[in-house]
Image: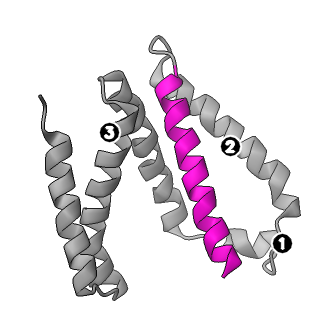
């Protein structure tokens, strides 16, 4: 149970810093050069941490068991990174851009979760979704 909360806390802290750093990338830097620097850093950090991460599966077996999803995920991650970088450069506020995007993604993932992963929704979940949709509409409103 502790790992359950530690894992989500890691996503919250990392996502917070992610948006702060994305918003802080200078406008005069080519977005693809920024992404290259980001991923070189990520590769180096992963290579440093890898020997210390406890795993019952050997490195060789892990590499053998990789499938197409890990590689296609790379395209999605680049789209995510580039999308936020360009959104912030286009004028989205850090306080609203991430919120708008995350709520919209969550709404899109609900039917995918139900259809492909056999997840289910309670009536409270549906009410929450309706409130999220209302929130998206309110976030979209410009004064």
Proximity of marks 1 and 3: CB atoms separated by less than 8 Å: no
Point out the stretch of residues depicted in magenta.
1-25
Q: Which residue is mark 2?
A: 42
Between discs 3 and 2, the one toward the N terminus: 2
Q: Which residue is mark 3?
A: 96
Quadrant assignment for the C terminus: top left
Looking at this view, name the residue that lies furthest to the right: 52
SS at circle 3:
helix
**Relative horizontal placement of residue 94, taking residue 2 as reference (left or right):** left
Which quadrant: the N terminus? bottom right
Q: Is residue 84 left or right of residue 139?
A: right
How many neighbours does mark 3 have within 10 angstroms: few (below 14), some (14-19), or many (20 or more)? few
| Magenta segment, prevailing SS (helix, strand or loop) | helix
Name the residue tied to disc 1.
54
Residue at 20%, 74% (x, y): give it.
127
Q: Residue furthest top?
A: 28
Other residues around mark 2 within 10 Å, as few (<14) / some (14–19) / many (≥20): few
Mark 1 or mark 3: name the one nearer the start of the chain.
1
Residue at 50%, 16% (x, y): give it.
26
* CA separation in Å, label 1 and label 3: 38 Å
């Amino acid at each position: 149970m502790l790992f359950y909360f530690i894992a989500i806390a890691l996503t919250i802290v990392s996502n917070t810093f992610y948006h702060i750093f994305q918003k802080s990338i200078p406008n005069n830097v080519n977005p693809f050069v920024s992404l290259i620097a980001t991923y070189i850093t990520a590769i180096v950090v992963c290579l440093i941490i890898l020997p210390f991460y406890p795993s019952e599966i050997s490195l060789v077996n892990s590499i053998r068991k990789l499938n197409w999803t890990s590689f296609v995920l790379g395209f999605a991650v680049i789209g995510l990174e580039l999308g936020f970088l360009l959104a912030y450069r286009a004028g989205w506020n850090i306080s609203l851009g991430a919120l708008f995007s995350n709520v919209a993604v969550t709404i899109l993932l609900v039917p995918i979760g139900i259809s492909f992963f056999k997840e289910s929704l309670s009536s409270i979940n549906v009410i929450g979704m309706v409130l999220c949709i209302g929130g998206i509409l309110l976030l979209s409103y410009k004064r």
